[in-house]
């Protein structure tokens, strides 16, 4: 299996900027301070551009699904740890199932 390092790099950029943009959006919502909106806007533009490159280098079906699952998992952990948001047991179970789905989606685990 050949590793596409460029794709992995752009996924890392996407996840980093997506996380930063989501934090800015949360801070904007909590503080109602417009500065967080204006800080988050260009960050999210980078996220969008990186996502478009991901589709170009990877695939719409598989690669973007992995990116979206990872984005959800990162945001749940940030909401829980940094912002003290409540996450129910069933929601944690859903997150674990999403994490378990990644090797299946990538074809790492195969059932014959």
Image (cartoon, rainbow, N blue to C red):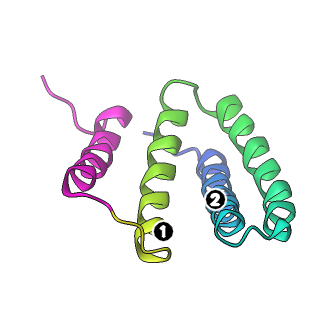
The first of marks 2 and 1 along the sequence is 2
Q: CA distance from mark 2 to mark 1?
A: 10 Å
Proximity of marks 2 and 1: CB atoms separated by less than 8 Å:
yes
The local crowd at label 1, few if under 14, some if 14 to 19, many if 20 or more residues have their Cα within 10 Å, is some
Quarter containing the N terminus: top left
Quarter containing the C terminus: top left
The residue located at (23%, 37%) in the rendering is 109
- The secondary element bearing badge 2 is classed as helix
- The secondary element bearing badge 1 is classed as helix
- Tell me the chief SS of the magenta region: helix
The residue located at (63%, 64%) in the rendering is 26
Q: Which mark, residue 5? A: none
Q: Is residue 77 left or right of residue 99?
A: right
Label 1 belongs to which residue? 78
The residue located at (51%, 42%) in the rendering is 68
Q: Is residue 39 left or right of residue 76?
A: right
Label 2 belongs to which residue? 22
* Residue situated in front as seen by the camera: 100 or 39: 39
Q: State which region is magenta.
A: 87-112
The local crowd at label 2, few if under 14, some if 14 to 19, many if 20 or more residues have their Cα within 10 Å, is some
Residue 76 drawn at (x, y percent): 42, 59
Residue 104 drawn at (x, y percent): 28, 35
* Residue situated in front as seen by the camera: 46 or 27: 27
Residue 45 drawn at (x, y percent): 82, 48
Q: Is residue 11 left or right of residue 31?
A: left
């Amino acid at each position: 299996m050949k590793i596409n390092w460029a794709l992995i790099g752009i996924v890392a950029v996407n996840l980093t900027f997506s996380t930063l943009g989501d934090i800015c959006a949360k801070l904007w919502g909590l503080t109602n301070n417009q500065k967080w909106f204006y800080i988050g806007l260009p960050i999210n533009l980078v996220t969008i551009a990186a996502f478009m490159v991901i589709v170009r280098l990877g695939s719409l079906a598989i690669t973007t699904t992995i990116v979206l699952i990872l984005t959800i998992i990162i945001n749940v952990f940030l909401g829980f740890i940094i912002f003290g948001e409540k996450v129910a047991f069933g929601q944690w179970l859903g997150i674990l199932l999403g994490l378990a789905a990644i090797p299946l989606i990538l074809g790492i685990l195969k059932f014959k």
